[in-house]
Image (cartoon, rainbow, N blue to C red):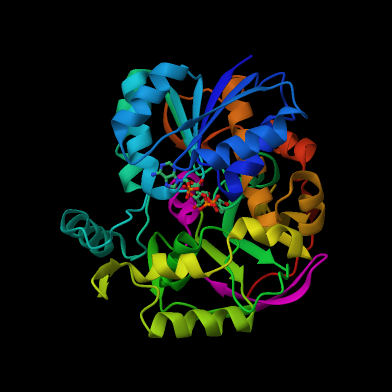
């Protein structure tokens, strides 16, 4: 029996909300609030006939702390699920603290305006101190640890698939499979085809920023940064086949390096097709990925926002996408004094996702873990005050919930290792 406020009503939120509505005994009441209320109304309308969850909708600009506070005070939720954009993480966390409500999200904070001099000064200091230059990192949200702890509240960060499930896989490996984990390779493969020459599977702005950033990995206690897309490997993915994958910086490496004791190396690889990479390089070279406004015929235009307006809406890819995703973690280490390798992953079919909730698998593989994370908090299975990432909680009930609600795990005891 709980009331949940979901902020955002895009690709990922739509899946999370649809899945919450399949578990009405826990998600008894749900308010969908976003910048564009019409989208919330349309989704609520679609779901009402299929669920006993009581759904209401609201308009909110989550960049404005006071608007979120007013909405929370009005609705009085037990939990706020932030499935808007990483830009809103801090304002929504501030509002949750002001109102005494638990918080969760699916991606760590990054600013919308990376030219903001105040943010830039802190960012440049962090790049020097930590040794990686991605725009996003955990420091902004980890700074809220004491505040949440003192308020007796929980903030669950990054509860999608990666970040999210990948960290639960690591916690599971540490709990059940290894005495000592030496290396972790996170492999994210999208074998889906939407038929467009170029489109992104989730928010284009966030996606292109992530992919065009320099890559980095954790080794022997420090970061190693490399030029974007400069480390390429091939891997033969179960149910997908052979794909090229590239080493990227990814946020969960940062928290795993803190939370998996003794780990020597953590890397993250994502598959990309040649057409995607050629388009991205070209767009980058002509300045279309820039977040700095340019003056065009008397109007200020942010190139990457204009590009977003031209690209297909990720939510519209659902009916066109065929194929499967395969995301998981390969571990090496020791168990009972012997060397061991172990691979845990999930395979998800784009067309099956579309049949079930009307979305492609990227939104599905993020939205289902968001629902399962909320389920853990609302049922008290995860109850740790402060600001925490997924690997800090018991992985068992979470992985059981994922098995049950659409993202079952597969295990391979003898995986091919990534060179
Ligand atoms: P979309 O762009 O599809 O949806 C974003 C939603 O947030 C839209 O409904 C948008 O409203 C709303 N929104 C944006 N700004 C505001 C604001 N100021 N106030 C209120 N609502 C706002 O994004 P996705 O669904 O693709 O992604 C959602 C989140 O999931 C992102 O943070 C993304 O980084 C994360 N993600 C995480 C993954 C993981 O595995 N952990 C994988 C993929 C995504 P409007 O309709 O008006 O634009």
Is 50 displayed left or right of 333 in the figure? right
In the displayed structure, 270 sits above or below 28; it is below
Q: Nearer the viewer, residue 247 or 368?
A: 368
Across and down, in percent, residue 171 comes to 60, 42
Is 296 displayed left or right of 413 in the figure? left
Residue drawn 37% across the image and 56% down it: 136
Residue drawn 67% across the image and 62% down it: 317
In the displayed structure, 247 sits above or below 175; it is below
Across and down, in percent, residue 367 comes to 63, 44
In the displayed structure, 46 sits above or below 3; it is below
Looking at the figure, which quarter contains the C terminus?
Answer: bottom right
Residue 251 among those drawn in magenta: yes
Residue 24, image quadrant: top right
Residue 155, image quadrant: top left
Q: Which residues are magenta?
A: 234-262
Residue 119 among those drawn in magenta: no
Is 294 displayed left or right of 330 in the figure? left
Looking at the figure, which quarter contains the N terminus?
Answer: top right
Observer able to see residue 145: no
Q: Nearer the viewer, residue 381 or 220?
A: 381
Across and down, in percent, residue 204 comes to 50, 63
Q: Nearer the viewer, residue 322 or 261?
A: 322
Residue drawn 40% across the image and 24% down it: 71
Is 235 displayed left or right of 391 in the figure? right
Observer able to see residue 83: yes
The tally of labels here is 0
In the displayed structure, 401 sits above or below 79; it is below
Residue extending farthest to the front is: 297
Across and down, in percent, residue 359 comes to 70, 51
């Amino acid at each position: 029996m709980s009331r949940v406020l979901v902020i955002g009503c895009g690709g990922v939120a739509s899946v999370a909300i649809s899945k919450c509505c399949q578990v009405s005994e826990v998600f008894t009441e749900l308010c969908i609030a976003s910048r564009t209320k019409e989208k919330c109304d349309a989704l609520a309308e679609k779901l009402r006939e299929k669920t006993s969850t009581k759904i209401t909708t609201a308009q909110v600009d989550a960049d404005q702390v006071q608007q979120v506070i007013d909405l929370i005070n009005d609705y009085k939720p037990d939990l706020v699920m932030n499935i808007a954009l990483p830009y809103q993480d801090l304002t929504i966390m501030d509002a949750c603290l002001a109102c005494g409500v638990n918080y969760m999200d699916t991606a760590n904070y990054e600013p919308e305006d990376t030219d903001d001099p105040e943010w830039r000064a802190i960012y440049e200091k962090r790049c020097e101190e930590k040794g990686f230059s991605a725009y996003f990192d955990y420091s902004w949200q980890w700074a809220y640890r004491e505040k949440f702890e003192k308020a007796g509240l929980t903030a669950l960060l990054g509860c999608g698939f990666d970040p999210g499930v990948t960290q639960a896989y690591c916690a599971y490996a540490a709990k059940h499979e290894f005495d000592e984990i030496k290396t972790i390779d996170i492999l994210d493969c999208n074998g889906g085809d939407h038929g467009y020459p170029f489109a992104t599977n989730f928010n284009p702005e966030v996606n292109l920023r992530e992919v065009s950033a320099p890559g980095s990995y954790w080794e022997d206690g420090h970061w190693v940064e490399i030029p974007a897309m400069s480390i390429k490997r091939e891997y033969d993915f179960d149910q997908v086949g052979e794909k090229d994958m590239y080493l990227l910086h990814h946020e969960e490496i940062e928290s795993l390096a803190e939370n998996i004791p003794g780990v020597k190396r953590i890397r993250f690889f994502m598959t990309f097709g040649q057409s995607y990479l050629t388009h991205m390089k070209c767009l980058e070279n002509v300045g279309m990925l820039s977040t700095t406004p340019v003056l065009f015929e008397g109007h200020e235009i942010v190139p990457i926002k204009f590009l977003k307006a031209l690209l297909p809406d990720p939510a519209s890819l659902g009916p066109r996408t065929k194929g499967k995703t395969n995301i998981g973690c390969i571990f090496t280490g020791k168990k009972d004094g012997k060397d061991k390798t172990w691979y845990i992953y999930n395979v998800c079919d784009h067309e099956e996702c579309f049949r079930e909730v009307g979305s492609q698998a990227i939104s599905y593989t993020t939205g289902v873990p968001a629902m399962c994370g909320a389920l853990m908090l609302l049922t008290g299975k995860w109850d740790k005050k402060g600001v925490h990432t997924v690997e800090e909680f018991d992985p068992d009930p979470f992985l059981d919930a994922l098995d049950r609600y659409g993202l079952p795990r597969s295990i391979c005891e003898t995986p091919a290792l990534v060179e």
